[in-house]
């Protein structure tokens, strides 16, 4: 073991400390054990509070101030992450039983046989290691399984296979999944010869239920987009469908816009999503929208359409909160102000470069701190109007 | 669990209601802590809850989902979930997502507590 196993010995006999240090001198010298001492249960709790990495407690039963059995109860009560071995008089089965009932892992009898004690200590340390390894593997396995299932679903169907390239606009999108798979999605599709649909969305929570909800929302929206000209009507229909029987209270924030390539006319509805940005002649402004709500939380909500015109050269930047809520080690957020400054500075960049600038800046800001949310951006620039 | 964000949910009973004060950050890594704090109260038959968010620094959509579930479950049991002391940041999240229209939001704790009907 790289670091010594920290062991707390609790006994009111003053000379036990000397004896223990002498008997275990080799282990101490080798750095296998680090011994701490306390003379009663109360002192033991203080030592544990100061040394939260102590994993093994060897405790006598009869002590002043606080006895060993009370100490065991206290350890259970505070859910201390320690294994306890009690030291009891030979044949004192009543106390030993009580101790085991209060969570002791093992016991040794007095007078202490130090060979037996060492075997017991080693066995207990082994048990602690197995427990800790099992916990770590379980967490890893759960996370891994979840990521695999969701990642393959995301890969196969959530994101458009290829974004269209035309002379009239540039469009680019990128999703950086967090370690913990989330439920962002974007979409981009043509509705007819002149009109394009643009979507960005973020589903609440993580894991497989969120991934399923993502798939459903995306499919429903795409279907609704075919028979409703108004984005608000699309959102209304999708909201009706996803709010029904929504026992898990899942919800999705979703921004949906329809762009008319003939004149740059953009009609959109915002279901509780972060307002996108309009980049116009180097100026960045929030795309204003009615205060509509996330989809899935209130079935009767009436959504609203808003409109603006994208002039030739203007760009639209859609994002999810994984960008602005990315955190650094000091728990500071990246924030909207940094985003707006970056967008203004990169206003003339090609769309892939614009997104790369933002993603790189967020990653640099986070400084290696693992993020728990996906980061998704979609950017579009109007290059020319399509003749009617 | 590794890399779990810090969250504690201290609570106290006040005027026939239970006040929960989520403290720290609520995100996907620790949302079950908030969830079980609410469930414990529900199971104890305490259905009037005030979420005092004065010490909440951040809430992700996963956290919002738990608040929504709490409000719905409490209502189903004839109770209420009220929310108060939203910081500017939390208020913004409530506003963008529209949760301020769905959840019952109050100014401070006294406002929230007095919103429970004493006759029920």
Image (tube, coloured by chain):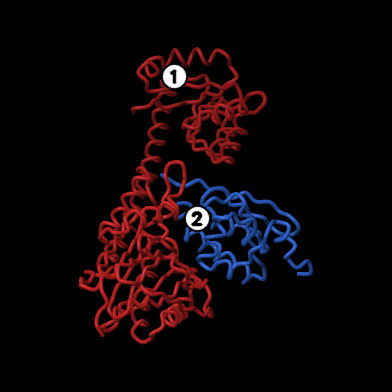
The quarter of the picture where residue A207 lies is bottom left
Label 1 secondary element: helix
Measuring 32% from the left and 58% from the top, which residue is drawn there?
A: A347
Image location (x, y in percent) of residue A215:
34, 71
Q: Depth check: B82 or A9 in front?
A: B82
Chain letter, colour red in render = A
Q: Quadrant of the C terminus of chain A?
A: bottom left
Measuring 41% from the left and 20% from the top, which residue is drawn there?
A: A115
Q: Quadrant of the N terminus of chain A?
A: top left
Image location (x, y in percent) of residue A32:
37, 23
- Lateral position of residue B56 relative to residue A118, left or right: right
Count of numbered marks: 2
The quarter of the picture where residue A133 lies is top left
- Disc 1 marks which residue? A114
Q: In the image, are marks 2 and 1 on the same chain?
A: no
- Lateral position of residue A40 relative to residue A265, left or right: right
- Lateral position of residue A134 relative to residue A113, left or right: left
Tell me the colour chain B is drawn in: blue
Q: Residue furthest bottom?
A: A227
Labels 2 & 1 near each other (Cβ < 8 A): no
Image location (x, y in percent) of residue A262:
29, 81
For residue B32, the mark is 2
Q: Is residue A67 visible?
A: yes
């Amino acid at each position: 073991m790289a670091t010594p196993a920290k062991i707390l010995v609790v006994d009111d006999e003053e000379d036990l400390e000397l004896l223990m240090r002498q008997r275990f001198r080799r282990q101490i010298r080798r750095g296998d054990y680090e011994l701490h001492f306390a003379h009663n249960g109360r002192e033991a709790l203080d030592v544990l509070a100061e040394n939260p990495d102590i994993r093994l407690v060897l405790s006598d039963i009869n002590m002043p101030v606080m006895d060993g059995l009370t100490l065991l109860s206290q350890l259970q009560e505070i859910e201390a992450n320690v294994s306890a071995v009690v030291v009891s008089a030979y044949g004192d089965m009543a106390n030993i039983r009580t101790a085991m009932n209060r969570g002791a892992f093992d016991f040794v009898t007095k007078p202490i046989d130090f060979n037996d004690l060492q075997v017991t200590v080693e066995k207990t340390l082994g048990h602690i290691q197995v427990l800790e390894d099992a916990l770590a593997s379980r967490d890893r396995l759960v996370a891994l399984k979840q990521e695999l299932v969701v990642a393959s679903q995301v890969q196969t169907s959530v994101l458009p296979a290829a974004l269209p390239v035309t002379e009239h606009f540039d469009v680019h999108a990128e999703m950086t999944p967090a370690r913990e798979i989330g439920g962002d999605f974007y979409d981009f599709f043509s509705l007819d010869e002149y009109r394009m649909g643009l979507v960005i969305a973020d589903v609440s929570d993580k894991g497989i239920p969120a991934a399923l909800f993502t798939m459903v929302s995306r499919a429903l929206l795409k279907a609704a987009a075919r028979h409703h000209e108004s984005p608000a009507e699309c959102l209304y229909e999708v909201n009706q469908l996803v709010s029904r029987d929504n026992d898990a209270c899942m919800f999705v924030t979703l921004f949906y816009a329809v762009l008319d390539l003939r004149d740059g006319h953009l009609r959109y509805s915002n279901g509780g999503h972060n307002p996108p940005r309009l980049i116009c002649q180097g100026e960045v402004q929030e795309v204003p929208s009615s205060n509509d709500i996330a989809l899935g939380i209130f079935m009767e909500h009436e959504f609203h359409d808003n409109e603006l015109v994208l002039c030739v050269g203007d760009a639209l930047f859609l994002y999810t909160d994984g960008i602005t809520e990315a955190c650094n080690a000091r728990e500071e957020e990246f924030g909207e102000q940094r985003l707006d400054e970056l967008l203004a500075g990169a206003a003339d960049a090609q769309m892939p470069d614009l997104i790369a600038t933002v993603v790189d800046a967020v990653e640099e800001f986070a400084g290696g701190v693992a993020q728990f949310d996906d980061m998704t951006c979609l950017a579009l620039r109007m290059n020319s109007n399509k003749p009617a | 669990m590794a890399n779990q964000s810090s969250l504690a949910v201290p609570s106290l009973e006040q005027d026939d209601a239970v006040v929960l004060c989520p403290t720290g950050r609520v995100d996907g890594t620790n949302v079950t802590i908030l969830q079980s704090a609410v469930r414990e109260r529900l199971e104890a038959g305490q259905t009037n809850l005030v979420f005092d968010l004065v010490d909440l620094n951040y809430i992700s959509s996963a956290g919002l989902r738990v608040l929504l579930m709490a409000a719905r479950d409490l209502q189903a049991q004839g109770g209420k979930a009220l929310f108060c002391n939203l910081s500017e940041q939390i208020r913004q999240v409530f506003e963008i997502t529209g949760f301020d229209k769905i959840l019952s939001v109050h100014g401070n704790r006294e406002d929230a507590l007095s919103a429970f009907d004493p006759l029920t």
